[in-house]
Image (cartoon, coloured by chain):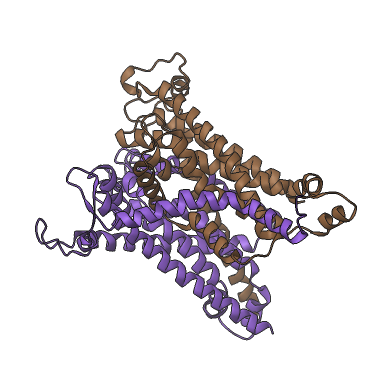
Amino acid sequence: MIPRLTTLDRKRWRLVGLLSPITLFLGVFFLAPLSIMLVYAFLEPGLYGGVEWNYYHHNFGRILGWADGEFEEFDLVYLQIFARSFRLALTTVLGALLICFPAAFWVSRLDDRWKTLCLFLITLPFFASLVVRLFAWVIILKPSGFINQTLISMGLIERPFDMLYTEGAVILGMIYIFIPFMFLPLYASLEKLDRSLIEASSDLGASRLKTFLRVTLPLSLPGIIGGSIIVFIPSLGNFIVPDLLGGAKVLMIGNLVEQQFLQARNWPFGSALAMMIMVAVLIFLLIYVSVVTRSETMSEGREF
Amino acid sequence: MLGWMGGLVRGLSQRTLLCYGLVFFAFVYAPMVIVFVYSFNSNPVNMMAWQEFTFDWYRSIFGLSNKLTEQALYVESTDQLKAAVKNSLIVACTTTTISTVIGTMTALAMARFRFRFKTFYRVLVFMPMIIPDIVLGLALLIYFVTLGGELGLITIIIGHCTFLGSYVFIVVSARLAGMDQTFEEASADLGANRFVTFRRVTLPLITPGVVGGALLAFIISMDDLVITYFIAGVDSTTLPVFIYGMLRRGIKPEINAIASLMILFSLVVASSGLYFRSRAAR
């Protein structure tokens, strides 16, 4: 005789049933691959691609500039690329913030109907192919591209500017593709912002600048931080934008990792580099989570 | 006097903001408009110097007769292009189905049950979206190669499902969060069993969320470049990877036409999705 299942048992089995697909899938195809990558970062690269299965910490040493003492000399080239990636990613965040903040502020003050339309128009490019949007900038910036052609035909310049394959082009490209990521969090916090606070501030005699600095900016801080993190993470490890708009001149960590895997075939070193990207991203995420929880507890404390 | 000046300043700043907003949207849309306009330019040598209007680039994509010389084209492109589009559609349809089922099940479990490892699961589900795509793509590459699997459509599908399930989860969860549980309780009180309740009450209620999540998954899968780039085999190129390869080899005017068609396709899918969602929300 089969024992009757109690309701509690049945409920538990339903839960197990609902959760098992994602558990299995992410366990086998997400956690396991990442663990193997972590192991690879500590393995010795084989002579002709491939790996030797012994512990080897020189992969990380190489990133930091300490050579393994036999074949390599002290060289800071990898740290320099890391530094450049951080600089470009931070500039991208800052640029996106400066471009999106006034626009988000403007949209948050519109009538509902216009608001919906503007949000729709902001979201739409996110769905258009990323490669295509970057390609658009290639044909705009290249020496025989849209800007140079226009300027030359207007007689303003004689020789084309070099705009493609510069750091500026990479930053511009990254800002362009990440605009929706920055705009939406900014909009969300500006939209919630209580207008009467701004009015109160100006009624009490604060100048517009002071009102902005003391009221609007602090209250939209969660959106600013959220948008910055969401833009920073994909910028840091990006290799498509520097590849298409930066050429060989503007290498970022992402390009380095890609080269190690697909050209140099040094998978352990590539894994070590990828792990460094991961660590950087996780650190920034932890900062974000702690800031958000603190601001949440603060605003709760204010209400009660 | 002061009030009048304040009004003037406010009016001015209102107008500045409006102008800025228009410039902002121009910045967002101009590059795509430029691609679209120049896809009708007949100049085969310098694609950004306007010559005259032509449909030839579109005709050559679809293999129709045109007046273009061989040199102006990616000679081999038409067949490969078709294969890439076919691969992209196969991958996108399969991953959308799988990730929609997995994501919806997870969302139901998280919204309707209390259990000990909930925080763990929440972090686990968010991880694939947060992790840089280059890291996930390469981790999967190492994994598949180490296990001795062959890279191809199956590996691409698996790779996409690892992170698309999370996107579906978020969209469906948002729908479930705003949903009234009393309908389900009423259905149970009226004697419907679990399955009937799910089929007749829960599912219709969450359908907008599920459809929205599926559309999002479809679009992201169609557009994914980085992860696909690493785990696609030689014969299983998808459309974005194909275009990326073309761009790396050099730019020819034909690509304008392909790019315009891709923009139009994704805009149509996305706007119908957003339209559907806004109607469902009402």
- A296, A221: nearer the viewer: A296
Relative height, residue B62 to residue A276 (above, below): above
Residue A119 makes an appearance in the image: no
| Image side of residue A82 versus residue A137, left or right | left
Residue at figure coordinates x 57%, y 62% from the top left = B122
How many labels were placed on the picture? Answer: 0
Residue B219 makes an appearance in the image: yes
Quadrant housing residue B199: top right
Q: Quadrant of the C terminus of chain A?
A: bottom right
- A35, B141: nearer the viewer: A35
Percent x, y of residue A168: 32, 54
- B149, B201: nearer the viewer: B149
Residue at figure coordinates x 51%, y 66% from the top left = A226
Percent x, y of residue A28: 47, 49
Q: Looking at the colours in the rendered structure, which chain would you say is drawn in brown? A: B
Percent x, y of residue A138: 36, 42
Farthest residue in the front direction?
Answer: A1
In the rendering, what colour is chain A?
Answer: purple
Quadrant housing residue A60: bottom left
Quadrant housing residue B257: top left
Percent x, y of residue A11: 72, 58
Farthest residue in the right direction?
Answer: B190
| Image side of residue B118 versus residue B262, left or right | right
| Image side of residue A209 versus residue B251, left or right | right
Relative height, residue A134 to residue A227 (above, below): above
Farthest residue in the top direction?
Answer: B65
- A84, B7: nearer the viewer: A84
